[in-house]
């Protein structure tokens, strides 16, 4: 049974490597341990607990006065199957990529496009993680979460979660209320390949793949990701810092006249394979392109910077503070707004 510890540095618990101090810190590996820790919350603690998974989508800008609890609930269990699907329940503290590898090893299809995304299974529904044309909502069955308000476990169906682009009820309306304990996925026994993304097709071709498989797609995704995203073990970062913004296509067409190279995808089409003509409606822009055009790519001030190969990723070269990185993100926001009239929204959770 784990206990509360005082004044713990969170540096090794967040991939930005920010040295924030948690006034109270604890780890739980079961639902019972979680309940016992919540019962034993030291009297002087304020606020509801902050739940930490792999710390790969967080920017700490200050020390944390409230309790911080790290989820380490483990376990992967096949709970049901039929002719087409397997249903697999996974502890929230399992590593996401570890789970993806587990599925690849059993030929369970559906998560191969989401290979190499850092972090825990329990955080994956928070922002409906996505990459290369697939989002977790496509394989989601249900999840169980502890309700801090009512003190009991709730089951959330796909509809309950209100998944959107990098969004869910847990990041929105119910922020801070639920602790995700386990997630059940529905995976395909017979694979449905998602290769609409141009980059995947090109990489599969480069690899000389004759026969498509989920293992080949996973390898292609791993190759693409390692070629442009910084490895948090080498350079602190939290992946894309901002969301790709969606604007009215009329605005996009206007920008296209001024900036012919601008990258945008009509919103209705999944993936994002080209810059085709914007239909009426909405267009999703590549924020990385906007930021690069403002001259930020490779920028560095002190230890806070913008990645040299992907302008959407802010990096910590060593000792940047969360506030310095936040200030840099403010400057980027302002300059993109000034040049393009587009307001970026942060994807990373600011704490
Ligand atoms: P944390 O950073 O620990 O937490 C994130 C948020 O979820 C926090 O608000 C936290 O309080 C909350 N939370 C965590 N666990 C729980 C729980 N069990 N119950 C309730 N709340 C919880 N994301 C993508 O979508 N697509 C990508 O392609 C992608 N690429 C990335 C590449 C890199 C190099 C990095 C560093 C990050 C990338 N990300 C990507 C972002 C990140 O990996 C995901 O958001 C991931 O799901 C975060 O998991 P985590 O366990 O690290 O969450
Ligand atoms: N681009 C530039 N300059 C840059 C970066 C990007 O011009 O510095 C342009 C390029 O034209 C490129 C386009 O932007 O073709 C898209 O870039 P990329 O394929 O790298 O993807 P992204 O839009 O930057 C999104 C997700 C990633 C996800 C990839 C693959 C968001 C906010 N980010 O990035 O998710 O892995 O697509 O699907 O939606 C994350 O959420 O942390 C994350 C890494």
Image (tube, rainbow, N blue to C red):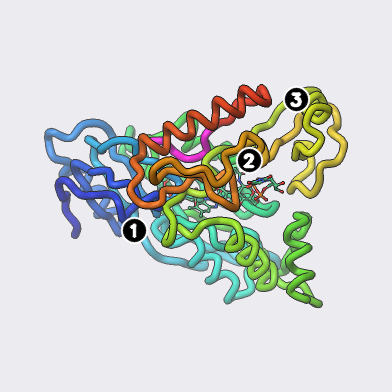
Which disc number belongs to residue 89? none
Which disc number belongs to residue 72? 1
Measured Cα–Cα span from mark 3 to mark 1:
42 Å
Give the mark nearer the N terminus: 3 vs 1.
1
Q: Nearer the viewer, mark 1 or mark 2?
A: 2
Q: Nearer the viewer, mark 3 or mark 2?
A: 2
In which quarter of the view is residue 160 placed? top right
How crowded pointer 3 is (Cα within 10 Å; few <14, some 14-19, many 20+) is rated as some
Residue displayed at 25% across by 48% down: 35
- Is ligand 2 less than 8 Å from the beta carbon at label 2? yes
Residue displayed at 22% across by 48% down: 25
**Residue 223 in the figure: left or right of residue 271:** left
Mark 2, secondary structure of its residue: helix
> Where does the magenta region start and end?
346-351
Magenta part mainly helix, strand or loop? loop
Residue displayed at 63% across by 52% down: 131
Q: Name the residue that disc number 3 marks.
A: 248
């Amino acid at each position: 049974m784990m206990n509360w510890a005082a004044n713990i540095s969170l540096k090794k618990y967040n991939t930005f490597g920010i040295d924030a101090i948690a006034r109270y810190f604890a780890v739980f590996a079961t639902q019972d341990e979680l309940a016992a820790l919540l019962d034993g919350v030291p009297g002087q603690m304020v606020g509801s607990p902050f739940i930490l998974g792999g710390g790969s989508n967080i920017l700490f800008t200050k020390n944390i006065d409230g309790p911080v609890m790290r989820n380490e609930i483990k376990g992967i269990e096949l709970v049901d199957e039929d002719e087409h699907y397997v249903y697999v329940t996974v502890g929230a503290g399992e590593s996401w990529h570890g789970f993806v590898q587990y599925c690849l090893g059993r030929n369970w299809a559906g998560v191969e496009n989401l290979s190499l995304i850092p972090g825990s299974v329990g955080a994956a529904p928070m922002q409906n993680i996505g990459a290369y044309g697939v989002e977790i909502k496509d394989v989601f069955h249900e999840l169980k979460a502890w309700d801090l308000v009512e003190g009991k476990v709730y089951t959330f169906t796909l509809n309950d979660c209100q998944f959107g682009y990098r969004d869910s009820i847990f990041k929105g309306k119910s922020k801070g209320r639920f602790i995700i304990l386990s997630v059940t996925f529905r995976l395909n026994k017979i694979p449905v390949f998602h290769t609409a993304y141009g980059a995947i097709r090109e990489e599969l071709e480069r690899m000389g793949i004759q026969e498509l498989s989920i293992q080949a797609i996973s390898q292609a995704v791993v190759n693409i990701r390692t070629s442009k995203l910084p490895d948090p073990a080498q350079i602190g970062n939290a992946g894309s810092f901002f969301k790709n913004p969606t604007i009215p296509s009329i605005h996009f067409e206007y920008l296209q006249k001024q900036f012919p190279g601008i990258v945008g995808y009509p919103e209705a089409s999944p993936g994002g394979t080209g810059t085709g003509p914007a239909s009426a409606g909405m267009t999703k822009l590549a924020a990385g392109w906007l930021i690069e055009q403002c001259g930020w790519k490779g920028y560095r001030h002190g230890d806070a910077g913008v990645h040299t190969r992907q302008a959407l990723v802010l990096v910590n070269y060593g000792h940047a503070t969360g506030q310095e990185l936040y200030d840099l993100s403010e400057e980027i926001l302002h300059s993109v707004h000034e040049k393009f009239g587009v307001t970026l929204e942060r994807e990373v959770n600011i704490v």
